[in-house]
Image (cartoon, rainbow, N blue to C red):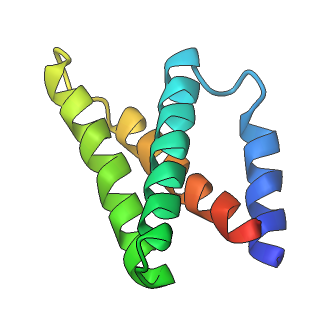
Amino acid sequence: MRYIITLLILMTHLSGHTLERDKKKHIAATTIISSLTYITSRDSGHTKMRSMFYALVAANVVGIMKEATDERVDRGDLAANFVGSVLGITLCWSF
C-alpha cells in the first residue's frame, strides 16, 4: 500500500506543468499497454511475476520501437515509458 501511495504522490507532483505533453502521452500509452498485457497474462494463468515481466517488456518494446522512428532518441521519453509501464502494473495490483 505504501508503494501505491508513494507512486500516487509522485504522479500528482509530476502531473503539473513540469512534464511536457509528449512525456505525459508516453506515460499514458505505456500505462495502458502494460495494464492490458498484465491482465491478459494473468487471465491466461501466468504468475504475477511472469505477468509483470511480460507487461514491462511489452510496454517498453513498443516505446523503444516508437523512439526508433524519431529523428533522435529522447532518454526522457524512454524514462516516461518505464514510469508508465510500472504505473500500469501497480494499478493492476491495486485492484
Nearer the observer, 23 or 88: 88
Picture layout, residue 53 above or below residue 72: below
Instruction: Specify whether 64 is left or right of 13.
Output: left
Residue located 75% across and 68% down the image: 94
- The quarter of the image holding the C terminus is bottom right
Classify residue 41 by image quadrant: bottom left
Nearer the observer, 67 or 18: 67
Instruction: Specify whether 90 is left or right of 6.
Output: left
Give the residue at the far front of this rendering: 44
Query: How many discs mark residues in the rendered view?
Result: 0
Residue located 37% across and 79% down the image: 50
Instruction: Specify whether 62 is left or right of 2.
Output: left
User: x and y percent of residue 23 in the render?
Assistant: 51, 27
Picture layout, residue 8 above or below residue 67: below
Residue located 74% across and 45% down the image: 11
User: x and y percent of residue 1 in the render?
Assistant: 83, 77
Classify residue 2 by image quadrant: bottom right
Picture layout, residue 18 above or below residue 31: above
User: x and y percent of residue 24 in the render?
Assistant: 58, 27
Residue located 49% across and 33% down the image: 29
User: x and y percent of residue 14 in the render?
Assistant: 72, 38
Nearer the observer, 75 or 3: 3
